[in-house]
Amino acid sequence: MPFVDSQGTTFSFGGVEFSATNIKVKVTGKGYDQRVDVSTLDLASGADKIYEDPPLYDYGSEGRKTEISLSYLGDEAPNTEDELTLVCAKFGLNTQARCPEFELEAAVGEKIKGTATFVIPG
């Protein structure tokens, strides 16, 4: 069975096409770990951290969360105010999403690069 390659992958948000260099799609479901770190400063160096179950669990409205991390070239600033259509056919995405954060980076001798996080409401 041949493996699927990344080339030809396109990404758009709110109708704006991004020149993607890396896309990660992370899906977490009901079983993801939400244990709380209750370690205190009196633990000796090299000791194991201590964890407890949380008082409440957060599984979202449907028990699943999808988060997309995008790295791209250019100075596009994704809309961080509205829920818009996110499209990435290679990953079967054509849905409403939010962009809670993005950042742009300019460095000597480099093209401007951006990174953004998109969340699909559960």
Image (cartoon, grey):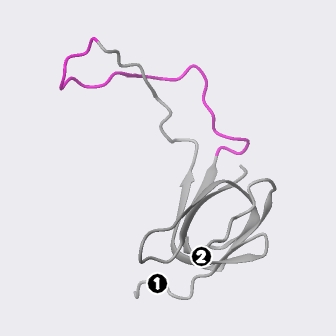
23 and 122: which is toward the camera: 23
In the depicted structure, whether residue 40 falls above or below residue 83 = above
Point out which mark residue 117 bears.
none
Horizontal and vertical percent position of residue 68: 59, 61
Q: Quadrant of residue 92?
A: bottom right
Horizontal and vertical percent position of residue 44: 20, 17
Q: Amino acid at mark 1?
A: Val
Q: Magenta segment, which residues?
A: 42-63
Q: Residue at x 46, y 29 (%)?
A: 35
Q: Amino acid at mark 2?
A: Gly
Residue 51 is a magenta residue? yes
Residue hosting label 2: 74
78 and 118: which is toward the camera: 78
Q: Residue at x 25, y 15 (%)?
A: 43
Q: Residue at x 62, y 72 (%)?
A: 75
Horizontal and vertical percent position of residue 42: 27, 11
In the depicted structure, whether residue 9 falls above or below residue 56 = below
82 and 49: which is toward the camera: 82
Tell me the SS state at disc 2: loop
Residue 97 is a magenta residue? no
Quarter containing the N terminus: bottom left
Name the front one of labels 2 and 1.
2
Q: Residue at x 74, y 75 (%)?
A: 16
Residue hosting label 1: 4
